[in-house]
Image (cartoon, rainbow, N blue to C red):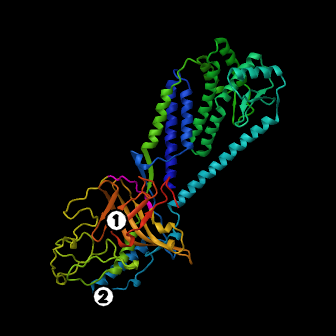
Amino acid sequence: MEDYLLYILKLNILAAIMILLILGVSIFLNKKYSVWWRSILWLGISVILLLPVRIPDSWSVIHIRIPQIADTREDTSGNKENPSVIKKEKESEAQLNESNESGGKTAVQNLPTERQSYSTGSRPAGAGSAVSVLSFLWLAGVTVYGAYRILGSYVVQRELKRWSMPVRDKSLEMDYQRLCKEMKVKHPPKLRMNAKLTTPLLSGVVRPYIYLPSDQFTKKELELLLRHEVSHYQHRDLWYKLILQLVCMVYWFNPALHLMKRKAEQDLEFLCDERVMKNGVHEERMQYNYLLAQTAVRSRSFYGLSTGFNGNLANLKKRMVNIMKAGKKKKGAVLTVCFLGLFVCANVMTGCSTKKPQDTSVNSVASVSDSDVEEPSVSATPEATPEPTEALTTEPLPTATPTPEPEKTQPDTEDVQQPSDTEITEPENDDPDENPSDSDTGETDENEETIEPVKAKVNVYEGEYNQSNLYSGAPGTANEGYIVKVTNVTDTSFDFTIYLYTFDPDTSIQNEDLVFKTHTAVFIDDGTKAIYDGIDYDLTFTFPDYHSAYPEATDMEISGYAPVEGETFMNNQIPGHGFS
């Protein structure tokens, strides 16, 4: 949801820039080009905003990642993480290490357990609450502003119908029908007379009517007035105005769209004038301008979703000049294609998403788990890495404090307690696999050659990849499973952390216990596989396409770590590929 809101914000910023650019360029093109190209662009921008199809991040050339504020987590007892708690935990870990050095194995239960597990149900909203607030404000604004506009249109329609009556002049009705046949309008709107109006107008999207004022006009003047309104109806200008109104209702917070709406409504009147006077002689154009001046000085009684003949006095001079040049200007189809293509390309080539911070609390949790399995005594010969057991609190973690390693002349990069020289017996070791020399990042192979990461061919998303049984909903099977949390995704790597999720149906408490600390996996080979090459474990990540979403990585399988071996992990929060 956060990324989608960022996409909406990005789309509005691009639309605002494009609107200002179009208006700026129009200043230099008005003498040569008609407003037709601009009216098409207003419609194109509105349609794109009303159908905000999110572009995949893999298409973007410029991608902006906005850092996300880390959530403050709470444990099951309600205590928040704070520096004092972390400090106490570190002191307890130091005491445990001292006890191990003295030769005794300290019981883990004596350590404080504030952060050994935390409840996802009691996790405060954090950044999620900000998203919820912004979503609520957006929807509230849409509701309030939309209700205001809809109510205004309803009042206008009611008043128009209340004060209108059928046309009693049969000759006027016959002239109107003849005009509609000449303009090839098969189903023309009905004529009504309204004493409250000062200008003819077209109103009603579903059932349109042309309302005429009760003022006396000559036959030629009535023909020009009716031709103007029928032209609006013929080119679906009321639907055009409805789309503009909808985009302003949905994105009420964007002032550039309201400016676009005002300019687009002015362009509709300019275009209608050009269509009516395209083949008109000089005398007809002068008479048309006289009608404009005559109706513009009168107050306009009705607005709403309608098109009227007169406009405001501010645009009267521009309309008159435009009428005298009607039919002599270019449409500007090339300009329309260029600007619309620029807007689409800018939307496709720029991306924006949140970058989740790494949870620093993992290190503290992992330290406690490491202490559960450490043996203070030193073996004379190197031992094989133990396999994880059913009790998660005793599972070895990838970065646990290692036992002394044979044939190692330099101290490890990690801050660990090394035994004295008298406690170590040099073993005979011909197997290079028994003496791991890789660093914790696991980025070197057996021949000390650096593993070269490649660009990923699959799109791994930040978030949670849940074990498939958690989606089954079957009693018992959905109460426990593993979760792989993915963070810091780049073109060549991603960070992963593995948790055990448990749910107690009696108390409705959900817990996540850390079983594999945060490490980085890099993509190799053809970019569809990733590995983590560590000291204790070598993990391989593959991404099968079980949900037909390739290259979006909705599914993940991990080998090299017994608890998750052979399991499928799924992410149903990928935009456009949700499932249950």
Tell me if residue 33 can be seen.
yes
Report the front residue among 430 and 382. 430
- Does the magenta-highlighted stretch encompass residue 194? no
Residue type at mark 2: give it. Gly
C-alpha span from label 1 to label 2: 31 Å
- Residue 302 at x, y percent in the picture: 74, 34
Most frequent secondary structure within the magenta stretch? loop
Q: Which dot marks residue 519?
A: 1
Q: Which mark is residue 17?
A: none
Left or right: residue 184 versus residue 99 is right
Query: Is label 1 in a helix, a strand or a loop?
Result: strand
The image shows a total of numbered marks equal to: 2
Q: Earlier in the sequence, mark 1 or mark 2?
A: 2
**Could you tell me residue 527's position as x and y percent?**
33, 54
Residue where numbered disc 2 is placed: 104
| Among the 4 quarters of the image, the one containing residue 531 | bottom left
Residue 456: say if magenta.
yes
279 left or right, relative to 460:
right
Q: Where residue 413 sits in the image (x, y, percent)? A: 25, 69
**Residue drawn at point x = 34 percent, y = 82 percent:** 96
Q: Are marks 1 and 2 in contact (CB under 8 Å)?
A: no
The residue positioned 45% from the left and 52% from the top of the image is 353
Magenta region, residue range: 455-463
Q: Secondary structure at mark 2?
A: loop
In percent of width and height, residue 321 lies at: 60, 19
* Residue 357 visible in the shown view: no
Left or right placement of residue 55 versus residue 142 in this view: left
